[in-house]
Amino acid sequence: MDSLLLIGVGLLGLGALLMVLEAFVPSGGILGIAAIASAIAGIVFLFRYDAMWGAIGLLGTAVLGPMIFFGALNMLPNTSFGKTMVGDSGEEIAQTRANQMRASKEARAQLVGLEGTALTNMRPSGVVQINGDRHDAIAQGGIVDLGESIRVTGVDGLTIEVRKI
C-alpha cells in the first residue's frame, strides 16, 4: 500500500515540475494541462492511500500550484531565455537610450571648430557635410548658400550651429 503514497507524491512532484516548465517553455498550454492532470492523478492516488493524505495533497496543490507557477513567471525575465523571449525591461531600455543620447551629444560637441560645406541652401536650416558626414544644422547670422564653406560655432543639445566662412 505504500506504493500508492509514493506514486501520489511523485505525481504531485511531476505536476510541480511541469508547472515550472510551462512558465519557461512556450508549449501553448500543453505542459500546463499535463501538470494539472498529473496533480489530479497524484491527489487520487493519495486519497486511495488515506483520506488525510489526500486532503493534504489537495490543499497543498491548491496553495502551492499557483505559487510555483507565478514564482517561475516572476523569475523568467531574469533568465537569458526570458530576456530573449520578453525583451529588455523599461529601465534597461531607458538606460540604453540615455547612453545613446549622451554619446550623440558628445560626438556633436566634438564638431565645434571644424569646417565643412553646405549641402543645401540654409535659410536658416539645412544640411552640411563635415568630415564626410552629413548633419542637419542651423546657420547663424544669415543665409548660407549651397556649396559655401561653413564652420561649426556651437552645439545646442542636438542642434549644430554653423556660420559661413
Image (tube, rainbow, N blue to C red):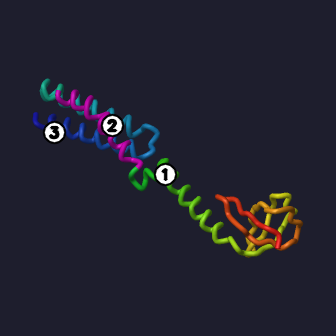
**Residue 88 seen in render:** yes
Between marks 1 and 2 in the image, the one whose residue lies nearer the viewer:
1
Name the residue rendered at 34%, 43% in the picture.
72
Residues at badges 3 and 1 in contact (C-beta under 8 Å)? no
Q: Is disc 3 placed on a helix, strand or loop?
A: helix
User: Residue 113: x percent and y percent?
Assistant: 70, 74
Q: Position of residue 133 (x, y in %)?
A: 73, 70
Kind of residue at disc 3: Leu
- Residue 137 is left or right of residue 100, and the answer is right
For the residues carrying marks 3 and 1, which lies nearer the camera in this image? 1
Q: Main secondary structure of the magenta part?
A: helix
User: Marks 1/2: CA distance?
Assistant: 29 Å
Name which residue lies at 38% across and 37% down: 32
Label 2: which residue? 35
At 86% across and 65% down in the image, what residue appears?
A: 144
Please rate how many residues cluster around mark 3, counting C-alpha atoms within 10 Å: few if below 14, some from 14 to 19, many from 20.
some
Give the magenta-colored segment's residue range.
56-77
Q: Looking at the rendering, which quadrant does residue 104 occupy?
A: bottom right
Q: Amino acid at mark 1?
A: Asp
Residue 159: quadrant of the picture: bottom right
Q: 106 or 22, which lies in front?
A: 106
- N-terminal of the pair, mark 1 or mark 2, is 2
Residue corresponding to mark 3: 6
Badge 1: how crowded within 10 Å, few (<14), some, or many (20+)? some
Q: Nearer the viewer, residue 25 or 110?
A: 110
Q: Is residue 64 left or right of residue 156?
A: left
The residue type indicated by label 2 comes to: Ala
